[in-house]
Image: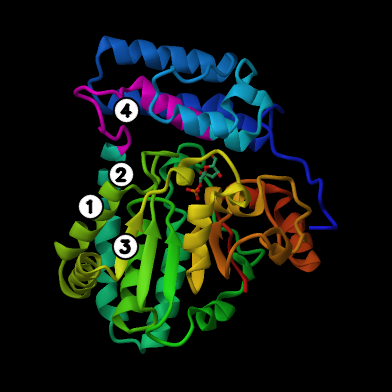
Amino acid sequence: MSDHPTAPVILGDEPGTFPHGVLAERHPAIIRQVREAFPYGPEQHRALDALLAGCTGGTIEPLPADAHDRRHWEAWGMDAYAGRSWYDVPWLWSESWFYRRLLHAVGYFAPGPWQGIDPFRPSKLAELDSPATDEELAALDDLARQPVDERARALLHGSLWGNRADLGFRLSAEGAEETAAVPALVADDSERLWPLLGAPGTGTLCLVADNAGRELVPDLLLIAHLLAHGRVARAVLHVKPYPYYVSDATTADVVDAVRRLTGAEGAAAEYGRGLWAALTDGRLTLRAHPFSCAPLPYADMPDGLRADFAAAALTVVKGDLNYRRLVGDRYWPPTTPFAEVTAYFPGPVAALRTLKSDVITGLTADTEAALVAAEEQRWRTGGTHALVQVRT
Ligand SMILES: O=P(O)(O)OC[C@@]1(O)O[C@H](CO)[C@@H](O)[C@@H]1O
């Protein structure tokens, strides 16, 4: 990273910027949505009121002394940021902190009747049960007639564009439209991805999942296809240990998605049965590492997680937030080489992401110029562009 060692870390302190809008508007909207989703009691409403006041105008208050994960948060910077405004600490940190505090407010971690109740489950299920999901599953019957490699390419693109289905993003992206002036894919290394899987039937694919529902389903279809055709021997799917960024996938969401597939008809059901069998016989394993909800970049990952990624032939990292964590949540010059900012990653890595925040690396100067000419800086956050970037 020699050329760009000091790209500024993104904070949320500047009114009018995307990060400020997330803290000042998106988080209050999420609190409203969660209040409406469940008949929470007075204690939870009071805690949500306090969170609303704190996250929009207050300071960071440490977790209670008996919080089960206090040790993690201490290691992740809680004591250093305590007493500071949510807007003045790294935006990545304050966003993660918001979801941790929200779960505290609704009693997600405390022993009692609300323990383990995902406040985002109603919206996740609504999406999984939607007619749009039916249509996507029905389309798999046509895809089944394509050659195996074509199917792999189509499923990769399904997984990529599935990342637009992010329920938090949709809270603030009404009206985002496709634009034809510049290509939808701002970087496309997808043909470099396949050889990294190694000799058929030998390698392990790690997939770091992002959203549940209409993103997780195509992620699972891609894994099912690669396993069924012996393209990889094993797959490891990393999910979140607790609800996060509204629609991020947890183990419960994987189970819901696989059941949605097995309960469908035709090719979709076949994929579902393949996934069920792979989970049962250990070819597909799930991981829910605490660091998956950490407010830090992957460059700071602990050794256990590092070993997991090091053992994979390829790690596919899905989505916008994971991209921010992969390259570092900084205002990089857009032409900063992706390979440089991911040089620390312990093995080959591919990012599949639709662009929903300011962070970007690995563009050519021509692509950046075309994007700016057509859209000024809106291409960074509109969710209408995507990328596939690979570091071998
Ligand atoms: O990671 P995902 O689901 O693709 O996107 C998450 C997201 O909606 O949330 C963040 C802002 O809160 C942004 O990084 C991005 O826009």
Of mark 4 and mark 2, the one earlier in the sequence is: 4
Of mark 4 and mark 1, the one earlier in the sequence is: 4
Q: Is residue 101 magenta?
A: yes
Figure check: 266 above or below 81: below
Q: Position of residue 326 (x, y in %)?
A: 60, 54
Any atom of ligand 1 within 8 Å of the CB at mark 1? no
Which residue has dot 4 on it? 109
Q: Position of residue 382 (x, y in %)?
A: 58, 49
Q: Are the residues tagged 1 and 2 within 8 Å (C-beta)? A: yes
At x 53%, y 83%, the residue is 195
Q: CA distance from mark 4 to mark 1?
A: 21 Å
Q: Quadrant of residue 342?
A: bottom right
> Disc 4 residue type?
Phe
Which residue has dot 2 on it? 124
Of mark 3 and mark 1, the one earlier in the sequence is: 1
Q: CA distance from mark 4 to mark 3?
A: 25 Å
Q: Name the secondary structure under disc 3.
A: strand
The magenta span reads: 96-120
Which residue has dot 3 on it? 285
Figure check: 284 above or below 36: below
